[in-house]
């Protein structure tokens, strides 16, 4: 009998406190193949901490996070299985975009030919030999997305990937993520851009104050809440009329 | 991972600047040792040896031992236990390599690609070690050329044996490699570039002071433990031993110090949130 295929991402009871104050409390959710999951929440809700926890970048106080059936730290070739965008990629200002990707390719154990391919895909071929210190935020974000795609992963974990992207870039990103999911890949994407999430996400998870307050499908959200994700979000987060 | 770290090293300005400063510092130090001091002694420059008295270090470049001393790729210490510019630059090359990823966020990409973080540290150490060894070889060649050139100008015979020259240069490259890797480990431990630089320069500057204080406290005799401080160890390695520490013991101690620093850096990175 075949082993069941592990979920791309399964988070169970994840907990993390910082100086006695809970940042993430009993967070559980999963991301299935072929789905784009939007991770939403107000500033400081715990979205980025959750992402860092499941990637093993931050030690957890409790709970489990399984990426393709194993804790991230136990993956053999993680960069060939999971593509990650955090903090606009951590580019060294003295390196060019191409050099940054060449280093990432060597770390990921993928061929150098992938560098040119992903540069073309994110529309950075012409600026690839400029130093990253001269890049705009959007260009840095494109290089970060290119780095995430280098290893042709099965799962994408993206923290605010649309930051700084121009309208054409955002359009490309939406199309790319939908195509990625249509090809069987799984995506966890955190964003404040509810309209974008509404367009691309199949499922929605909402976190406030470190807790999951809603986990549902986009279809259910749109059916029940005046046809917009924004109405649903404001209701479940209790932030309607609140300026943060 | 090693190739990635090598590429990371050669594509940063700090590495090139540190290597250039090391080279410049070495050339300046060697010129003082093999050109200026002999010229001061003969009176070609300055008031002459008699007028300078004990202030002028005695440098007999006809002696094989002096010629070997001049071959140190870290620059000669003139017997005074001072630290040279080349030494500072080599150590800072390691520190900057260790802090660069933290400063610019690249450490996240590194540990995502290699979640077993000790491998990241080992790959960085191998890359910094290889880079420092390459710089060390250049420094050793420059040191030799400076000495040979200055000897030729004064028609002084080259009396050091070829084997001893090769051995001194090789030990010099080893010392440079270890010091750069120690710098890397300190950089990883400190995370902050400024902190790492200050800690390392502070340690280098403090060493001769600590040794002098220990000597005073000991009634004028050099304390044996001060010979195991990093700079003293490196000089002992280069010169094949010093005081009660033999060359072999010095090499073993410097390698052990490097290994301990790397293990500490690995543990720190493995336990740290990035």
Image (cartoon, rainbow, N blue to C red):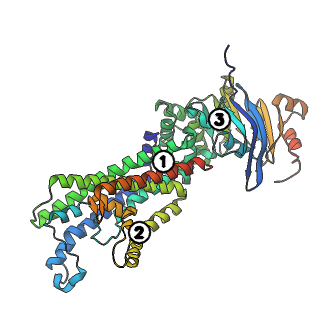
Q: Foreground mark, 1 or 2?
A: 2
Q: Position of residue A63 (x, y in %)?
A: 74, 39
Q: What SS does tag 2 mark?
A: helix
Q: Position of residue A25 (x, y in %)?
A: 79, 45
Where residue A244 sits, quadrant-wise, is: bottom right
Is residue A92 visible from the viewing direction of this image?
Answer: no
How many residues crowd around disc 1 within 10 Å: few (fewer than 14), some, or many (20 or more)?
Answer: many
Image x and y of residue A220, in percent? 86, 29
- Estimate how packed mark 2 is, as few (under 14), some (14 to 19) or many (20 or more) residues with alpha carbons within 10 Å: many
Q: Mark 3 points at which residue?
A: A71
Cα–Cα span, label 2 and label 3: 45 Å
**Is residue A116 depicted above or below A240 in this figure?**
above
**Protein chain holding label 2:** B
Chain letter for mark 3, please: A
The residue lying at 27 percent from left, 66 percent from top is B76
Relative vertical location of residue A12 with respect to residue B45 in this rendering, above or below: above
Residue at 17% in and 81% down:
B49
**Secondary structure type for disc 3:** loop
Query: In front: mark 3 or mark 1?
Result: 3
Q: Which mark is residue B207?
A: 2
Q: How crowded is mark 3: few (under 14 residues within 10 Å), some or many (20 or more)?
A: some
Circle 1 chain: A
Residue labelled with disc 1: A95
From the viewer's perspective, is the residue at label 2 or at label 3 nearer?
2
How many labels, in total?
A: 3
Q: Where is residue A45 in the image (x, y as percent from the top left)?
A: 78, 48
């Amino acid at each position: 009998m075949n082993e069941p295929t592990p979920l791309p991402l399964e988070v169970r009871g994840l907990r993390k406190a910082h100086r006695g104050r809970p940042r993430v409390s009993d967070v559980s959710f999963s991301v299935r193949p072929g789905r784009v999951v939007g991770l939403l929440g107000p500033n400081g809700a715990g979205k980025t901490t959750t992402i860092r926890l499941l990637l093993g970048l931050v030690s957890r106080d409790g709970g489990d996070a399984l990426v393709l059936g194993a804790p991230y730290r136990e993956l053999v070739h993680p960069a060939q299985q999971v593509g990650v965008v955090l903090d606009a990629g951590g580019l060294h200002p003295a390196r060019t975009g191409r050099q940054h990707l060449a280093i990432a390719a060597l770390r990921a154990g993928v061929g150098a030919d992938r560098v040119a391919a992903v540069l073309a895909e994110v529309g950075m071929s012409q600026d690839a030999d400029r130093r990253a210190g001269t890049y705009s935020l959007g260009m840095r974000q494109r290089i970060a997305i290119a780095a995430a795609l280098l290893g042709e992963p099965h799962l994408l974990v993206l923290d605010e990937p649309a930051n700084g992207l121009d309208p054409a870039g955002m359009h490309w990103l939406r199309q790319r993520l939908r195509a990625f999911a249509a090809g069987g890949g799984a995506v966890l994407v955190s964003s404040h851009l509810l309209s974008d999430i509404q367009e691309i996400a199949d499922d929605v998870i909402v976190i406030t104050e470190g807790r999951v307050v809603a986990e549902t499908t986009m279809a259910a959200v749109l059916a029940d809440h005046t046809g917009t994700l924004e109405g649903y979000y404001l209701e479940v987060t209790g932030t309607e009329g609140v300026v943060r | 991972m090693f190739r990635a770290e090598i590429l990371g090293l050669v594509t940063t300005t700090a590495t090139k600047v540190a290597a250039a400063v090391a080279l410049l510092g070495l050339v300046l130090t060697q010129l003082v040792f093999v050109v200026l001091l002999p010229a001061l002694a003969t009176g070609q420059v300055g008031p002459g040896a008699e007028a300078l008295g004990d202030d002028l270090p005695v440098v007999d470049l006809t002696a094989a031992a002096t010629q070997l001393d001049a071959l140190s790729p870290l620059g000669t210490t003139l017997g005074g236990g001072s630290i040279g510019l080349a030494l500072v630059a080599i150590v800072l090359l390691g520190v900057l390599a260790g802090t660069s990823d933290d400063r610019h966020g690249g450490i996240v990409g590194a540990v995502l690609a290699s979640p077993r973080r000790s491998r990241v540290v080992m790959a960085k150490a191998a890359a910094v070690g290889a880079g420092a060894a390459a710089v060390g070889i250049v420094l050793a060649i420059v040191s030799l050329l400076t000495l040979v050139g200055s000897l030729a100008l004064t028609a002084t015979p080259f009396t050091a044996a070829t084997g001893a020259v090769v051995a001194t240069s090789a030990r010099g490259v080893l010392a440079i490699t270890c010091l750069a890797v120690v710098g890397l480990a300190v950089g990883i431990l400190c995370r902050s570039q400024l902190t790492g630089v200050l800690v390392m320069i502070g340690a280098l500057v403090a060493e001769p002071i600590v040794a002098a204080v220990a000597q005073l406290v000991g009634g004028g005799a050099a304390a044996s433990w001060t010979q195991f401080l990093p700079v003293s160890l490196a000089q002992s390695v280069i010169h094949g031993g010093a005081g009660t520490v033999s060359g072999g013991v010095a090499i073993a101690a410097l390698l052990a110090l490097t290994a301990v620093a790397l293990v500490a850096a690995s543990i720190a990175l493995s336990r740290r949130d990035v």
